[in-house]
Amino acid sequence: MKPLRQRGLATLFTVLTLLAVASLVLIAASRQLLLAHANAQNQHRYHQALDYAEEGLNQAQAALAAGMPLRGTERYQLAQTEILPNLIRLSSTGLYDGHRVTVQRTIRLGGRGADSPVALAIIGDLDLSGAVDLLSDKPVEMAVDGKVALSGSINGISTLQSTGDIAINGPQTINTLHSNGNIELANGRYQTVKAVGNLTLRGDAAIAQLARVNGNAQFLSSPGMDPAVRAAEVKGDVKIDMGGARFGRLDTEGKVEIHQSGGMEALQARGDLSIQGWGAPISGAIAGHANFNANNPDIRVIQDPKLQIKLEPVPMLQIDRPRIDAFDFKNEAHYRFEFDHGRIQVMVRKVHGLDDGVYRLGLSPDSQLPNYLCRDTDNQGRCKSGAPAQLICKGHAPQNDCFAGSRPGQWRLDSRTMAPGILWFDGNLEVGNGVYHNSFIASGNIATSGQHSSYAVNYAGAIGICRNNDFPALYPEDDCRLGVFKGKPIGNAVLLAGGYAGGGYQGGDITLGASSQVHGNVWAGNMLFSGGSTTIHGYVTAARQGRAGAGQPHRWGASTTIDLRNLPESFQPGSQPDNGGGNGKRAVEALPYSWMDSE
């Protein structure tokens, strides 16, 4: 036997060796956690710098559109390079905590004129249970000055902005949501979600890029997408209960409570961390207290009381409220329809083949057929002999009166077609069957029905306005100059309804009948209603200026298609009804390629 002293020394040596190995393991684990923490911090710096770079790029593009110089801030530096006279390369470098990310975008410059990307502008709450399909060659937005409830579907919108809460249950293909209130999603795939209030994900909802939240966030969905949420920046508290769904990166200034998840790639939290049960793989750092199963080797979270996280808040949205007033365009009409002592009176302005002035609508003095303009009519409604009479409307048959059934304040137009130009009506207007090359303006409401198809003046362009086959001798002289079409901003509207009169707002509702096809912008001063299977080739505004239906949401339950593809050059859908389509802005188009670098 070895002496007792030798056995004691051997035992002591073995214990010291084991302690040394354990210390090395702990040091390695600590270094791994510190490395993970450092990587998470670098990833946060990169993403924050990238956010600033993209913010600067958007500001630079807006400055180009407004004709203003580029101005950098402490968040980003801006530069531009002229490639061609109408082609500009914008460069924006985001700066955050020593990290720099540069992004570039190539811009094609167009002519001066308003060019809003908002294809759907709704004032008031929106309750959509039907379907809106938007077809466009470039990204367009939807703006709602109110709350949004979607149980139906919206497809093709790049960004949905709302000054109120957003609640979505139906399937959607919307890239970005931005709300001044709370956002609750039970379905759909989204690239970016920004909430000034709280965010809740349920059901099958997923976020492919980034969620930014000023309030609290609850991630309770379990979609098939991996990860269910790529990244989130939350200023408030966070609750995660997502079953087996994985989470990407989470940065929060609040506390984190995890019940179930398939794991988290990176975590940074200023508050406490609580993980129920065994927990899934997670690595990161927290400044508060930790409560989780220490036996799970996949939970690698260090406590750093000095951890600093300062997230940029989601900015408040400001949505412009357009002014839609038919009376603003009364003097721009080529044909203005009013009743005078029970007879239809038409004020004509700048129409080739007709002198400016007041006319009557009556029967031809020769054929006794309806729909003729003349200076005066007899007691039988016939144009007086000896005075020229001009046909301005073609009925479905020669003997059909286009305005049969019309009375003061209530106009009914049902025909094959009308003389081209801007038509203005005093009161409500119903337009039935026919193909029209007109911009319709009414001081009351407008409704379409039957097989209705209409083309706004600017949409119809030279072929429909200056060289109209049905009325080759009647064309608007201010739109057609030596055979060349030159439209006015109001010509972008195919339907405009509602106006201020008698100390208040009258009319403003537009009702599109089933199977209607309208080519141009639809500007409803109050509410828009669709009968289903309706197609609009232009932008839509429902301004909620009237008292009718006050306090009630816009309820869209039908199927509506907004097709913005292959629009004619003469038509500018981005012009707004209350600014004359100008304001000195310049059209800018972002080309579909970019470049990015970081250091």
Image (spheres, rainbow, N blue to C red):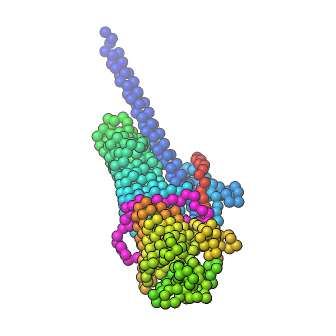
Quarter holding the N terminus is top left
| Position of residue 166 in the picture relative to residue 394 (left or right) | left
Residue 303: x and y in percent read 39, 45
Identify whether 489 is placed above or below 224. Answer: below
Residue 501 or residue 105, whichever sits in front: 501
With respect to residue 230, does 118 lie above or below?
below
Instruction: Give residue 269's position: percent from left, percent from top.
Output: 40, 49
Q: Nearer the viewer, residue 236 or 186?
A: 186
Residue 576 falls inside the magenta stretch: no
Instruction: Inspect the magenta stretch and tell me whether residue 552 lies in it.
Output: yes
Q: Residue at x 45, y 55 (%)?
A: 155
Residue 545 image-quadrant placement = bottom left
Give, as a single range, the part of the protein colored magenta: 546-574
Residue 245: x and y in percent read: 37, 42
Can see residue 55? Answer: no
As drawn, is 243 to the left or to the right of 410? Answer: left
